[in-house]
């Protein structure tokens, strides 16, 4: 049975340098192409945490050097990361498809994700980005540029930005048209470039949209059958790392909400994955979300492994 599947790939799975990423994506492409070879329509999303941090740090360092390179706003750093991660992924997937004699077009869409300018997250920035600074440097950045700065684990001060929820995807018609034509589309990279609507303008805003929530949003818009959120483990666990640890094969809405309220899932790690999976699975009857490892994605769709999140 042919399913429309949105696959959310973690940014950490792509390595910490362009060279490392080029090697890793060749392995990443294989299980993605397994799904395509099985007859499914695949839309790929990905994280960009290490990559956008690297770009932001490099541009900040260059701007503060004798070279006098212009400051690069954070939304533009996000766009850069989408471009080069997409370039690596689309070439690796294309090569794997051709190795299997499959003629399937692959394209990356640089994607803007619309957020609410009044999202409460902007009152409480939590996502650290960029370089470490001394207390004096941090105070200067707060004074001169209005940045929010926090002390980070004794290593110095870092800028923090908000993590608002996605409300729409600006390029949704483009992505949908490509999917309808049988293309493999890479979209909402790094959660998308955060923008807000101002009349006919889309205005970039320094923020980080969680890639799992952005993946759930594009899956909802495209009326996907499955959202696969990839992680380092094969299944989700409750009481993780404890003697009564339990791995979960299937959870419904009530169970997921109970486990979330009991604090079983770590914020910034498994919690957003479970919340995003639940959001998609409950958005329309029949939709399913699967949390598993990259290597087990095809087996998960076949019901052999992973944690399936369903309405009931």
Image (cartoon, rainbow, N blue to C red):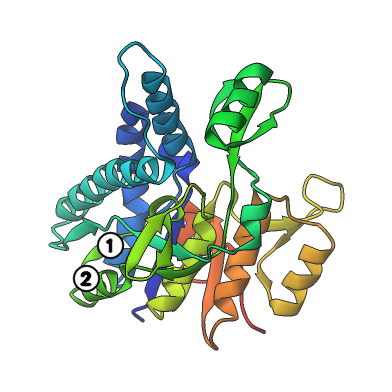
Tell me where residue 55 appears, x and y as whole percent: 39, 32
Q: Residue at x 77, y 64 (%)?
A: 260
Relative horizontal placement of residue 112, taking residue 310 as reference (left or right):
left
Q: Residue at x 73, y 70 (%)?
A: 256
Q: Residue furthest top?
A: 66
Between 48 and 194, which is closer to the camera in this rendering?
194
Q: Which mark is residue 174?
A: none
Tell me where residue 284 appears, x and y as whole percent: 53, 86
Give the residue at mark 1. Answer: 185
- Contact flag, marks 1 and 2 (Cβ < 8 Å): yes
**Residue 44 lies in what quarter of the image?**
bottom left
Give the residue at mark 2. Answer: 178
162 relative to 217, above or below: above
Between 147 and 27, which is closer to the camera in this rendering?
147
Q: Which quadrant holds the N terminus?
A: bottom left
Relative horizontal placement of residue 109, taking residue 260 as reference (left or right):
left
Tell me where residue 38 appears, x and y as whole percent: 31, 69
17 relative to 103, above or below: above
Label 2: element kind: helix
Label 1: element kind: strand
Q: Residue at x 37, y 77 (%)?
A: 222
Residue 158 visible in image: yes
Between 114 and 215, which is closer to the camera in this rendering?
114
């Amino acid at each position: 049975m042919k399913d429309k599947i949105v696959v959310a790939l973690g940014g950490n799975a792509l390595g910490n340098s362009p060279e490392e990423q080029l090697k890793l994506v060749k392995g990443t492409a294989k299980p993605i192409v397994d799904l395509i070879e099985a007859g499914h329509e695949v839309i790929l999303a990905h994280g960009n945490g290490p990559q956008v941090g690297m770009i932001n740090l490099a541009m900040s360092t260059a701007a503060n050097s004798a070279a006098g390179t212009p400051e690069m706003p954070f939304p533009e750093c996000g766009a850069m990361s989408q471009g080069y991660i997409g370039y690596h992924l689309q070439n690796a997937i294309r090569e794997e498809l051709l190795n299997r004699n499959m003629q399937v077009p692959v394209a990356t869409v640089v994607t803007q994700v619309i957020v609410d300018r009044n999202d409460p997250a902007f009152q409480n920035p939590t996502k650290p980005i960029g370089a470490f600074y001394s207390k004096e440097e941090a105070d200067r950045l707060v004074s001169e540029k209005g940045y929010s700065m926090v002390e980070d684990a004794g290593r110095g001060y870092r800028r923090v930005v908000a993590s608002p929820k996605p409300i729409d995807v600006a390029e949704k018609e483009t992505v949908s048209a490509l999917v309808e034509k049988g293309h493999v589309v890479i979209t909402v990279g790094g959660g998308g470039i955060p923008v807000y609507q101002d009349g006919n303008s889309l205005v970039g805003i320094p923020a980080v949209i969680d890639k799992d929530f952005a993946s759930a949003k594009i899956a909802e818009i495209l009326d996907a059958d499955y959202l696969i959120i990839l992680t380092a483990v094969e299944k989700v666990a409750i009481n993780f790392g404890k003697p009564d640890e339990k791995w979960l094969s299937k959870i419904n809405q009530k169970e997921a909400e109970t486990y979330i309220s009991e604090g079983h899932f770590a914020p910034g790690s498994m919690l957003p994955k479970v919340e995003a999976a639940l959001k998609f699975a409950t958005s329309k009857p029949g939709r399913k979300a699967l949390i598993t490892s990259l290597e087990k994605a095809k087996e998960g769709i076949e019901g052999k492994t992973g944690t399936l999140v369903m309405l009931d």
